[in-house]
Image: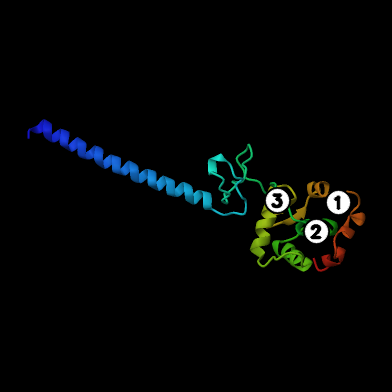
Amino acid sequence: MDQLDKAIADLQRKIERWTRQAEEGRIELAALEKAAKLRPNGVRRPPDAETDGDTAFFVQPAPISDDGRRPGRPTGAISDAWQEVLCILWIAGGTYSYTQIHETARDQGKMDVKEVANTRDRVRGFVASGLMSGTPETGFTVTEVAADRFQWKGTKDSAPLDDFADGAGKVEGL
């Protein structure tokens, strides 16, 4: 057997190996496709020709908006409980430390605010969105932006505290 015969035999072995690898790849692909059809998430695929009448569960991916974000709470949206806290602080006026804001939030009893650090993160978000202004050194105030956005405008005496269950009685001690 000369060099040319040896090269031919080597190439034939490589082709046989590649053929086996391709067949193994097709088997693995078929297994993954079947597993994908069986993946549950509570949404049933309607039977169609593609699934041969199979109504296996499938995952419906969350739609992505034009700006690349998934759906959820809009940027800057805050819960009713935090709106109440901000309203109380706005009516009371003045500036507040992280601790005072934390105590007001905790006293409302409508949310689980365990750590001052959690309140600190919230306040930073409120400052970034314009709902509050200030610094840790000078204290924080609720802005007119928040009053406009949540419709607390008018006189502070007639602010919509009746919309909140506990009213203004929680402001004392600030």
Query: Which amino acid is tagged 3?
Result: Val
Q: Secondary structure at mark 1?
A: loop
Query: Which amino acid is tagged 2?
Result: Glu
Q: Which mark is residue 127?
A: 3
Q: Would you call the spot at circle 1 few (<14 residues within 10 Å), some (14-19), or many (20 or more)?
A: some
Q: Residue furthest top?
A: 4
Q: Quadrant of the C terminus?
A: bottom right
Does residue 88 sit above or below 45 in this rendering? Answer: below
Q: Which mark is first along the chain, 1 or 3?
A: 3
The answer to which image quadrant residue 167 occupies is bottom right
Question: What residue would you read off at disc 2?
Answer: 84
Coordinates of residue 163 in the picture (x, y in percent): 87, 58
The answer to which image quadrant residue 141 occupies is bottom right
Say whether residue 11 is left or right of residue 87: left
Coordinates of residue 64 in the picture (x, y in percent): 61, 41
Say whether residue 127 is left or right of residue 17: right
* Contact flag, marks 3 and 1 (Cβ < 8 Å): no
Question: What residue would you read off at disc 1?
Answer: 152
Coordinates of residue 126 in the picture (x, y in percent): 71, 52
Say whether residue 49 is left or right of residue 140: left
